[in-house]
Image (cartoon, rainbow, N blue to C red):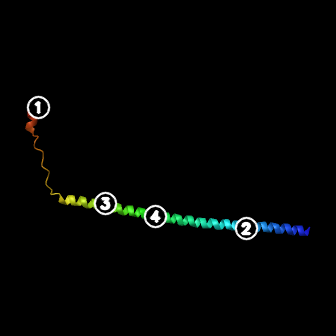
């Protein structure tokens, strides 16, 4: 009977040891997968930041160019009023009523 108990205990310890090894492997795979996901996330974040920075630079350049065009147009304006259309006068309106 003593021998049977010893064999049962050894068998149980062996099963427990295998379970601990599987859990350890599973934990290591989880940690490795988590690191891969973190690296992938950081890589995507860097790519997104670079894309947004490029878009912001482009928008800034476009805005500056537009602002320069507007300022040049304002500077080129002589300040003289546009000539009025004198083809339509009060006398022509009065003659149409009659």
Name the residue tied to disc 3.
63
Q: Position of residue 67 (x, y in %)?
A: 27, 60
Name the residue tied to disc 1.
97
Q: Quadrant of the N terminus?
A: bottom right
How much space separates mark 4 and mark 1, taking CA atoms? 73 Å
Q: Which of the 4 quarters of the picture holds residue 86?
A: top left
Q: Secondary structure at mark 1?
A: helix
Q: Marks 4 and 1: CB-CB under 8 Å?
A: no
Mark closer to the observer (1, 2): 2
Taking the image as shown, residue 1 lies to the left or right of residue 15, namely right
Name the residue tied to disc 2.
20
How much space separates mark 1 and mark 2, taking CA atoms? 108 Å
Q: Quadrant of the C terminus?
A: top left
User: Residue sitting at 9 percent across and 38 percent down?
Assistant: 90
Q: Secondary structure at mark 2?
A: helix
User: Residue sitting at 34 percent across and 62 percent down?
Assistant: 60
The mark nearer the N terminus, 4 or 1, is 4
Q: Secondary structure at mark 3?
A: helix
How much space separates mark 1 and mark 3, taking CA atoms? 53 Å
User: Residue sitting at 90 percent across and 69 percent down?
Assistant: 2
How much space separates mark 4 and mark 3, taking CA atoms? 24 Å
How much space separates mark 4 and mark 2, taking CA atoms? 40 Å
Q: Which mark is residue 47?
A: 4
The mark nearer the N terminus, 1 or 3, is 3
Label 2 packing within 10 angstroms: few (<14), some (14-19), many (20+) = few
Label 1 packing within 10 angstroms: few (<14), some (14-19), many (20+) = few
């Amino acid at each position: 009977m003593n021998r049977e108990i010893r064999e049962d205990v050894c068998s149980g310890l062996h099963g427990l040891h295998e379970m601990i090894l599987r859990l350890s492997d599973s934990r290591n795979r989880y940690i490795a997968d988590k690191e891969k996901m973190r690296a992938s996330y950081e890589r995507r974040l860097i790519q997104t930041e670079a894309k947004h920075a490029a878009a912001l630079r482009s928008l800034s350049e476009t805005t500056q160019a537009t602002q320069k065009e507007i300022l040049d147009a304002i500077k080129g304006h002589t300040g003289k009023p546009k000539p009025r259309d004198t083809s339509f006068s009060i006398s022509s309106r009065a003659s149409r009523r009659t």
